[in-house]
Image (spheres, rainbow, N blue to C red):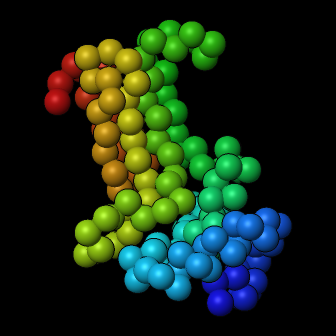
């Protein structure tokens, strides 16, 4: 069953209605069962757990999911242009080939607004964040 293994060390209360819906969907769809895996980030290390627990972790650990954030223009209260790199709790490698894609850098504001890059490792995400910061500061692509 989907929730039987609590060996991942993450215990959350899952409403019975949600648990029943997930198990029903899982029984109907191979595609849905492919999406059962989620991930958490512990001190820069990726740990695989079931996706519902990972979703709850993501919502309840705002500081742990933020890899880096840089304000290019403005203040913390009134940001005009900033770069944000976060950990994504589900694999964004939708084609299924290669490693999971679990990190994302985005630009908010300015000429590069909504620019996005994704990565598979914490190290790639840190490097990509600062490369994106430089791109925005220099006004280049």
Q: Where is residue 108 shown, x and y percent of the image?
A: 40, 24
Q: Of 22 and 138, which appears nearest the observer?
A: 22
Q: Quadrant of the C terminus?
A: top left
Q: Specify the quadrant of the image occupied by residue 34.
A: bottom left
Taking depth in this image into account, of 33 and 123 the one nearest to the observer is 33
What's the residue at 49%, 21% (across, down)?
A: 71
Q: Residue 38 at x, y = what percent?
A: 55, 69
What residue is shown at x 32% (from left), y 15% (from top)?
110
Image position of 100 with respect to 86: above or below: below
Q: Can see residue 25?
A: yes
Q: Is residue 15 above or below residue 75?
A: below
Q: Is residue 48 visible?
A: no
Left or right relative to 38: residue 15 = right
The image shows a total of numbered marks equal to 0
Quadrant position of the N terminus in the picture: bottom right
Q: Residue 100: which quarter of the image? A: bottom left
User: Which residue sits at x=43%, y=30%?
Assistant: 83
**Residue 4 image-quadrant placement:** bottom right
Looking at this view, name the residue that lies furthest to the left.
141
30 sits left or right of 13 in the view: left
Q: Which of 85/55 is in front?
A: 55
- On screen, 126 above or below 20? above
On the image, the x and y values in percent for residue 36 come to 52, 76
Residue drawn at x 76%, y 77% is: 9
Give x and y (percent) for residue 98. Answer: 27, 74
């Amino acid at each position: 069953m989907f929730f039987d293994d609590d060996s991942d060390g993450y215990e959350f209360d899952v409403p019975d209605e949600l648990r029943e819906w997930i198990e029903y969907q899982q029984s109907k769809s191979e595609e849905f069962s492919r999406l059962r895996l989620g991930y958490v980030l512990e001190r820069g290390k990726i740990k695989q757990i079931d996706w519902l627990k990972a979703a709850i972790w993501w919502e309840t650990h705002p500081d742990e999911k933020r890899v880096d954030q840089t304000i290019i223009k403005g203040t913390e209260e009134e940001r005009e242009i900033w770069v944000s790199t976060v950990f994504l709790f589900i694999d964004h490698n939708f084609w299924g080939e290669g490693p999971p894609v679990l990190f994302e850098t985005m630009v908010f504001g300015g000429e590069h607004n909504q620019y996005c890059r994704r990565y598979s490792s914490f190290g790639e995400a840190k490097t990509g964040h600062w490369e994106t910061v430089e791109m925005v500061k220099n006004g280049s692509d």
